Image (cartoon, helix red, strand yellow):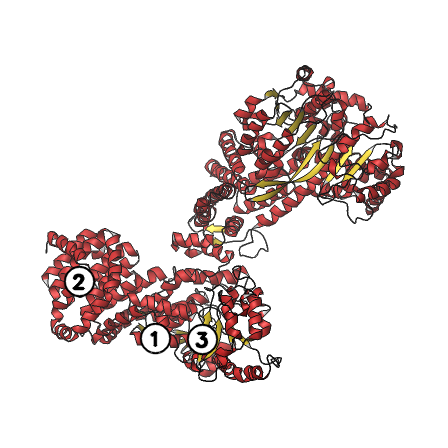
Amino acid sequence: MLWVDKYRPKTLDQAMVHQDIAQNLKKLVAEQDCPHLLFYGPSGSGKKTLIIALLRQIFGPSADKVKVENRTWKVDAGSRTIDIELTTLSSTNHIELNPSDAGFQDRYIVQEIIKEMAKNRPIDTKGKKGYKILVLNEVDKLSREAQHSLRRTMEKYSAYCRLILCCNSSSKVTEAIRSRCLNVRINAPTEEQIVKVLEFIGKKEGLQLPSGFPARIAEKSNRSLRRAILSFETCHVQQYPFTSNQAIPPMDWEEYVSEIASDIMKEQSPKRLYQVRQKLYELLLNCIPPEIILKRLLFELLKKLDAELKHEVCHWAAYYEHRMRLGQKAIFHLEAFVAKFMSIYKAFLIAAFG
Amino acid sequence: MSQADIRKWFMKSHDKGNGKKPAPTTSQTPSTAKEEPKEPVHGGQENPGRRKTSKYFTTDKPKAEKETEVPAKRKTHKEPDESVKPSPAKKVHKVVDDDDDFVLPHSKKNSVDATPSKKLKSASGVGVPQKLTAIDEGGDNDVKDAESPHKPGGKGRGGRGTSAGPAGGRGTSAGPAGGRGRGAGRGGFMNFGDRKDPPHKGEKEVPEGAPDCLAGLTFVISGTLDSLEREEAEELIKRHGGRITGSVSKKTNYLLCDEDIEGRKSSKAKELGTAFLTEDGLFDMIRASIRAKVPVQEAKKSVDDAAAAPLPKKSPNKVASKKDCAGSSLASSVSHKQLESDASHARRKKQPTEHSASTWTEKYRPKVPNDIIGNQSLVKQLHDWLVHWHEQFLDTGNKKKGKNPTNSSAKKAVLLSGTPGIGKTTSAKLVSQMLGFQTIEVNASDSRGKADSKIEKGIGGSNANSIKELVSNKALSMDGLKHPKTVLIMDEVDGMSAGDRGGVADLIASIKISKIPVICICNDRYSQKLKSLVNYCLLLSFRKPTKQQMAKRLMQIANAEGLKVNEIALEELAEKVNGDMRMAVNQLQYMSLSMSVIKYDDVRQRLLSSAKDEDISPFTAVDKLFGFNAGKLRMDERVDLSMSDPDLVPLLIQENYINYRPSSAVKDDSGIKRMNLIAHAAESIGNGDIFNVQIRKYRQWQLSQSACLSSSIFPAALLRGQRETLEQGERNFNRFGGWLGKNSTLGKNSRLLEDLHVHLLASRESSSGRETLRVEYLSLLLKRLTVPLRELPKDEAVHKVVDFMNTYSISQDDFDTIVELSKFQGHPNPLDGIQPAVKAALTKAYKEGSKTRMVRAADFVTLPGMKKAPKKRIAAILEPSVDVIGENNDDTLVESEEENSSDTEDLEGSAAGEKLQQELQSLNTKGVHVQFDLKGATNSSAKKTPTGRGRGGSSAAAEKKGGRGSGPGGKRKR
């Protein structure tokens, strides 16, 4: 089993980071009731871990007995019926799903499926909490319509259904929903905390940790605990015993993105743009989300860029990211960004060196 | 005449409405005066002009009548009056000119040329008109005066200009044709042999000569020309009145070729002594015609017109004006006709009466079978069939009903098929008529559903029933020879559709019992609907008549109507309408409204719009949009092009726009301009995508124009130019849009990833999202799966990896998925360096393990009797591994019921479950439930329990999908 899963805190008490939040949550549910919750924070900060631990806290071990189900729902949308396939993870007392998987049909999920689930009162309530919990992941990816449909559901069925929403950025969750929830911000763990966790794992696994090595991993991890643990283990798989100056391998796709970045920096021509397009396709085909590609690409480009261009390039990256979300065919916008960058950079080079 | 007068006249002319005619007929001067008022109207607003057009139509007939009354008078007027006459003619000009301003931009040029000539003349003419000219020249503010001096040249070229402008010298008209040619050649759809692109394509200026400078000459084109595509050259020659043939014969005047490729054509030409002509030679010929021929031609033409107008001075005017009309609109033609009515064509005048009487298609519908163009043999066949029909079927019918129609060669019905407008219905009717049959026609406008069986006995009612009645009624046809014989024409049988349920079957039934011949007519013989019908019919497939045949007939019509048309133009017309005689006649009639002389260019231009209706492939469209001539395309043409396939064209553009070297970026050594343009184009393409989302998702279809503007037209307009290759060995024509393929691969990959994700979730070890899985977990997973195989000794490695896979319920497919998703071009394959033996061992070990493996996900289990595990709906329940230990209790499982508890006790499920249970006796101690949701609505569930779990299993087998529910019973211990 991967360390990242193996050493995941199982209960709120075991939490190594965000202990304060964990304790607060514990108290919150101890008092019989629990409001709707909205967990938000950067990825790898422990939202999901806390949610699962919280569920366990509320429902006891039965929260662990889950089944994964890949069901097709027939939704009646006006004139036609739509088949929506959705994976749910459910126990007796909670259902976890990812409504944004349905793409632009997420509205129907919220309107029909979630409502349906929320409507049904848990049957056997004796000795248990009188409500069930719906965990919705990635609510920030829900379309505006879906979010609007959600807010009524949240109020109407709040007697026996609680929602736990989980997302990266609360800014993309509408005000209306945010105000109906108790917002819980989960910060990215600090590097010290990460080091602590890494050392804990090292001790448990009985590893020799050269001093400074966990710190380097933590630094590389961009304050994502999951990232840190994963790359920690990657290092372990790659080379053990550790040496203090051991290279920390980047993710495969990150490597590829940085290749693209250096391609772009080296030459700005239609031909190169064409090659870059192929490479971007490659990344997309490997299921790397386009936003992440764009972000990473910008990051890599900025590393090599003169200060005076940075501002402009950032502006364009944001511009094209926005458009990418408005649009559908990510590659068009990625390519547009690259083309824009090439034209800016080329002009800059010509101005600087003639 | 002062402005006030003009205004007065203006008012009057409106008030008068029809009362216009008297003026011209009675005296010349009033007519001019009357005409003048119109000018401000035309120049000023569009509407009056338009209205007048329609007025013209209505007034047309009366006027003609009047003319017939007065001809003698007029004629007498005419000749002596010459000095007066020029003014109307000139006036016509003016009017036309003004019209042009709003009708079609191109004709302006023409009128510009025309004006000076008029001015010259008007000098000689009456003073008043001249003043007028001046006035409206001031008002119009055209460039008129700019190029006045040489009248004849101006005229000739002006004429050219008109037609060249819109129809395009090399420019526009060549655009489509040339573009298509290139599309075909390059796009690889049609392979044009090895013909190369012309070496200096588009680099030469194509001359424009007098319209008929090549008249009477026959050309053959061979090989690659220097700068023209073959299609362009053909068009050039045709436009100038030449004829193109496919092979060299005695009649050939020139063989047009730039390089002697020693082909059959050139050898034949040498044999026959045909002159060789290079492209430059052709150009020179055409150019020469402007200078040399124009005057001559003019003279000639004026002679032609001399019957009406002997004065040569006037004729250029008229010709030019006619040309104007051709190029522009009815509006102009109206005024022109009104004026010219008295001025010249006595002959033409007569016709309006007739053509308002009936459309030409009716008027010139063949009267006897021999008039039918082409397909004579079929007509003959039809004739014979009808003639023999009665002998063949009725005799037998007399003796005994339906005894021997088994004769296979004789069919009781005939099916005529062919494209629209080639005379199927006409032939059927004509033949029937000729043989004295009375025709009863039933077409798509009648309901032709299945006859109701009750009414079949003859009570009449629905149409279908009357057909039945008709065909089965002996009396109709059998009442001796005195009665007219009857034939049933079922027109448009392939149109029998939704409304006509059972129509075809009923028709067949009718045919079987029919006492009268049945002629069925359809467009598409191979239509699915007619499959059964064809067995009962004699099949006659009408072919399209050749263009020569059509041109011949059209010529007859044109002559009868007094149109001056040359044969080349008619052939072009025949070709453009794609064999549809009816449409050709319609077009001809339409054109006759506005012009009395129809030339090649007129036809081309007229049909440009209808030609667009043909399917053009997206490749062709993209070629045109990016092509050299794209800049000359009108916006609506571009929209049409990109709308030819609004999904595919943008994709093609997106795929290929990088490849174009924009002709707008000149002197761009550093490539910076091009890069800027590309960035612009890319952004615009992105806009198109955003529009598209709005259209598709929010159904904002009104945005579709904007979408095609930004996704196709902008990028193409920015980057049009020469295409170049970016990769070695790439062929230099547009690639197919890559997005579609990539998108479907992406879809597949994300499905695979989702499978893996579900398995991981089912393993209960991980709970991350799909994206996180890909972005963060995947490289470590890959390492955990492959590094041991590479480094450790075989057995240990295999053991370790299989173990790991089991922990996360990674199947072999998932293994492949992980590897697949981690492959990057130019990076080593993650599986490199792993011995095949190790791989094989892994597979083997994994397979083996599957017998004893703790099952996590339902689709891992192969059910006896089922070929494949149910993939679609997976449900797996798992216990946390911690729980496993204390788990030997025999609790009969109490299920907490769930919503779907109804579908318990599925027989299949329990049977399978029991078998499984035996099979899985040896499972390790972890509690595992697996359940299946079989595809159907019923959820059969099978639950597997390991030995340790107690025979709850048997009951468990019957347990429902409630893995969730079943779990709690067994293992609530902690």
Report, in whole angstroms, how far the alpha carbon at label 2 lies from the one at label 1.
31 Å
Q: Is residue B84 visible?
A: no
Closer to the camera, A323 or B426?
B426
Which quadrant holds residue B55?
A: bottom left
B635 lies left or right of B452? left
Q: Quadrant of the N terminus of chain B?
A: bottom left
- State which chain disc 3 sits on: B
A155 lies left or right of A353? right
B131 lies left or right of B537? left
Select label 2 or label 3 by which is in front: 3
Label 2 neighbour load within 10 Å: few <14, some 14-19, many 20+: many
Query: Which label belongs to residue A54?
Result: none
N-term-proximal mark, 2 vs 1: 2
Q: Quadrant of the C terminus of chain B?
A: top right
- State which chain disc 1 sits on: B
Which quadrant holds residue A163?
A: top right
Closer to the camera, B502 or B879?
B502
In the depicted structure, whether residue B144 falls above or below residue B224: above
Query: Which label belongs to residue B557?
Result: 1
Report, in whole angstroms, how far the alpha carbon at label 3 lies from the one at label 1.
27 Å
- State which chain disc 2 sits on: B
Residue at the image position 82 percent from the left and 34 percent from the top: B928
Give the amino acid type for the residue marked by disc 2 in the picture: Lys
Residue identified by numbered label 3: B439
Query: Which label belongs to residue B20?
Result: 2
Closer to the camera, B322 or B854?
B854
Label 3 neighbour load within 10 Å: few <14, some 14-19, many 20+: some
